[in-house]
Amino acid sequence: MTDLGARRGHEDEWWRRLYGEAGAGGGAVRDAGASGAADTLDDRVASALRAVGPAGTRASGPRPPAPSPPAPRGEPAPPAAPSLYVPPGQDPVALPAADPAALDALVPDTELDGAAYGSLTLRAASLRGDLARYQGEPRRDALLTARFGTGRDTLILAAVATGRPGAEDSRRAARDACAWIGAAVGRSCTRLAEDIRTDRRDALRSGLQRLTDHSYGRLRARATERGTAPEEYTAALRCLLLPADPECRTRVFFGTGDGGLFRLHDGSWQDLEPAAPNGGFLFRPAAARAGDTLLLCSTGLAEPLREDAGFAARLAAEWGAGPPGLVAFLSAAQSRSTGHAGDRTAVGVWQSWPGG
C-alpha cells in the first residue's frame, strides 16, 4: 500500500470513530443512550483525536476537562433600595421631580433667614427631612418671615405651615397658607401693633381668628378650583407676631394644627402650647424676658424636642448662650434624633434687654 493509501485508510478510520460507524474491531458501535453530558461536534472531534492519536495510536496525557456549562440566565437582581438613614453631615441625595410647566412650584431643600431689631434677634430655618431627601420628595413645611409697618407700628410676622401628610400638592397648600395669612396680617399691621402694645387681648384674639379663618376659607376655595377635597388641600399653620417697638415686650402666638411653642429658660425647655378648644384656634400672648429664647416650630422639631431628652439638651446647650449665627442655628436645627426623619422648621427669638 502506498503512503497515500495508508493515510486515506487512517482518515477513514478517524471518521468512522468520529461518527460511530464502527468499533475498533469493525463491529457496530452501540448507542449508549441519551446523556446529560455535553455532546457537540467539537466534543466528538476531541474524543476521536484522543482515541486515534498520531499514526493510529491512542493519544497520551490526561484528558482536558470538560467545558463548564454556561451559567443559567436569569433576571438581573433589582437594585438595592437606598437606606433611609442619612449619616450625620450627609448632603441631600435626591431632588424632587420637576414639572417643566410649573417650575414656580419647586421648593428648595433648605431656607434660612434672620434679623435683629433692638432687643430682638430672629433666626429661622426650614429644611427637608432625611426621609424626603432620600425619596426625592419635596419639603412639605413652609416658612414665611416678613416685616410690616414703620416706626412704632413695625410688626414682624413669622409663619410656619406643614402640608397634610400624603396629600398631593401639600407643599402648595402650606405655601398658600403662609402667603395668605401674611397678606392679611400685613393689611392690618397698624391695628394689630396697637392692640399688642396696649395689651388688648380680646381684640387680638378676635381679630387674629378672623384673619386665620379667612385664610383657611381661601384654601378651601383653592381646593375647589383644583378639583381637590378641602380636607386634602390644607395645612397646619402657626404664627408669631413680634413688635419691633423696643418698649413692647409682648409676643403673640396664634394659629391652628400641630406643632410646638417652647421657651428656653435657664437651660430648660418649657412647653407653652395652649389648649385648643376642639382642635380649633390657638392663641397665646407671652411676655418676653431677657435671656430667654422663644421657639416656634413644626411637628418635625416639636416631637423630638418633647420625646428625646438628649436632643432637647443638645438644643438647649446650642441656643442657651445667646443668639447664634445663621449657619450655627441651621446646624443645631438639623441635629438628628432617632426615629424622627420628617421636615423641620424652627423660628427662634432671643431677648436681650439690659437689666432684664
Image (cartoon, helix red, strand yellow):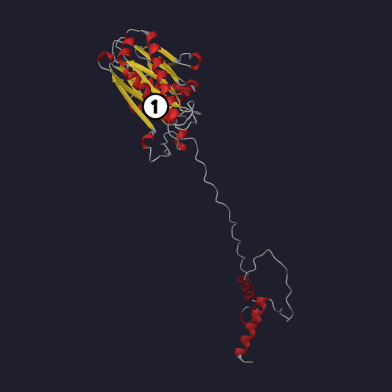
- Quadrant containing the N terminus is bottom right
Q: Residues within 10 Å of mark 1 (few under 14, many from 20)?
A: many
Quarter residue 128 falls in: top left
In this rendered view, identify the residue nearer to me: 240 or 106: 106
Residue 335 visible in this rendered orientation of the protein: no
> Relative to 129, is 8 above or below?
below
Q: Position of residue 89 (x, y in %)?
A: 41, 34
> Relative to 312, is 172 above or below?
below
Disc 1 is placed on an element classified as helix
Q: Position of residue 2 (x, y in %)?
A: 62, 92
Q: Is residue 144 left or right of residue 164?
A: left
The total of numbered circles placed on residues is 1
Instruction: Specify the farthest residue to the bottom.
Output: 1
Q: Position of residue 18 (x, y in %)?
A: 65, 76
Q: Residue at x 54, y 47 (%)?
A: 78
Could you tell me the amino acid type at mark 1? Asp
Q: Which residue is mark 1?
A: 176
Quarter residue 224 falls in: top left
> Relative to 213, is 226 above or below?
below
In this rendered view, identify the residue nearer to me: 335 or 140: 140
Instruction: Specify the farthest residue to the left.
Output: 151
Q: Residue at x 62, y 89 (%)?
A: 5
- Quadrant containing the C terminus is top left
